[in-house]
């Protein structure tokens, strides 16, 4: 198989690259080269900015692919560019959309690929929906061989999967746990959520590459394990070897008093219970099974982050904000009880 990844160094795509190469795939990555130092040997690099369409067109002029996958497209104009570049150069075009595009709030907590797409809370999700609409139109009218992939919350060893964190990453929450400070959990922590390790996601994705039955289809790739946010934070605290000091805060309150996009990321995503039905994926990729249980994956992540100081980025602004929120709640309780 000959494949081209646009991007190729993120949480999802990095996990796909290594097993593809081990199985003899001729893999090309098209990116600006800013994060290629950790790539495994055997990858063919096309160093360019995908937004420089004319330059990219020249670089791929004599190349064709079995699969082209765009991991970094977020708005329809970027897919329009991809269509112009690859309409005659690939047997399958894979677009990484998002499970946050599914109906919010849900009419049924069980999500299938037939669940309507609608998210009034998050522009990111609405843009992904618009991208899907454009690609489906090209498939129906022009025969462009698309496959739409919808990941949910996917993580790897470099970052903890959390509901509420700052703009500089997730380390500050772990640091607060280690310092025995209160840690904010949105809502009452009982809503259901699905975490998927990137290597499990990779199994499903690779099984859909070159799969004729995936052409024209939309498929989500997630674990079958469902946990509550209380369980997620407890798992992280257990992996750190500390007691969890949890403070539950209404998602609406967090969205109202933060500079972060908690309206989109919480109200439009993580504040809702989600349980994914992976029957379609398993029908298309019969060997797919997610084998990394969350507590196992979190232990790996904690071990890796503690051993790599470069992933321990402090976020003092977020830390101060957490303390302010906790104090505001304490003051509210005192005011009511007083």
Image (cartoon, grey):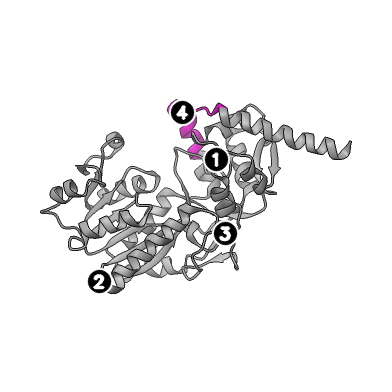
Q: Is residue 27 magenta?
A: no
Viewer-nearest of labels 3 and 4? 3
Q: Are marks 4 and 2 in contact (CB under 8 Å)?
A: no
Identify the disc placed on residue 34.
Answer: none
| Residue 175 x/y as whole percent | 58, 29
At horizontal 46% and vertical 52% (from top left) the residue drawn is: 124
At horizontal 40% and vertical 57% (from top left) the residue drawn is: 97
Identify the disc placed on residue 260.
Answer: 1
Within 10 Å of disc 4 (Cα), the crowding (few <14, some 14-19, many 20+) is: few
Q: Could you tell me which secondary element the residue under label 4 belongs to?
A: helix
Residues in magenta, as a range: 300-316
Label 1 or label 4, whichever comes before in sequence order: 1
Identify the disc placed on residue 142.
Answer: 2
For residue 37, say whether it is visible: yes
Quarter of the view holding residue 92 = bottom left
Viewer-nearest of labels 1 and 4? 1
Label 3 or label 4, whichever comes before in sequence order: 3
């Amino acid at each position: 198989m000959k494949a081209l990844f646009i991007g190729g160094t993120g949480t999802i795509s990095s996990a796909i690259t290594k097993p593809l190469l081990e199985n003899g795939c001729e893999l090309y990555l098209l990116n600006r080269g800013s994060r290629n130092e950790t790539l495994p040997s055997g990858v063919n690099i096309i160093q360019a900015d995908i937004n420089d369409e004319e330059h990219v067109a020249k670089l791929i002029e004599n190349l064709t692919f079995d699969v082209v996958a765009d991991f970094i497209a977020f708005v329809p104009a970027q897919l329009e560019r991809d269509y112009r570049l690859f309409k005659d150069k690939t047997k399958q075009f894979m677009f990484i959309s998002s499970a946050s595009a599914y109906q919010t709030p849900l009419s049924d907590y069980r999500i299938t690929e037939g669940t309507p797409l609608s998210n009034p809370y998050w522009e990111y999700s609405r843009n992904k929906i618009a991208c899907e609409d454009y690609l489906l139109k090209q498939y129906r009218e022009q025969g462009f061989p698309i496959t739409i992939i919808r990941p949910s919350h996917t993580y790897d060893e470099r970052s903890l999967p959390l509901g509420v964190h700052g703009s500089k990453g997730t380390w500050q929450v772990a640091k607060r746990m280690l310092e025995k400070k209160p840690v904010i959990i949105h809502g009452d922590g009982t809503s259901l959520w699905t975490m998927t390790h990137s290597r499990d996601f990779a199994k499903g994705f690779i099984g859909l590459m070159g799969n004729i039955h995936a052409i024209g289809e939309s498929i989500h790739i997630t674990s079958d394990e469902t946990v509550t946010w209380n369980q997620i934070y407890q798992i992280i605290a257990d992996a750190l070897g500390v007691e969890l000091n949890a403070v539950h805060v209404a998602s609406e309150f967090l969205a109202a008093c933060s500079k972060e996009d908690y309206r989109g990321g919480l109200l439009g995503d993580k504040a809702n219970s989600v349980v994914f039905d992976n029957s379609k994926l398993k029908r298309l990729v019969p060997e797919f099974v997610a084998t990394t249980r969350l507590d196992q994956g979190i232990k790996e992540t904690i071990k890796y982050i503690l051993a790599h100081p470069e992933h321990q980025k402090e976020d003092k602004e977020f830390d101060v904000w957490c303390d302010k929120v906790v104090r505001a709640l304490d003051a509210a309780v005192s005011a009511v009880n007083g």
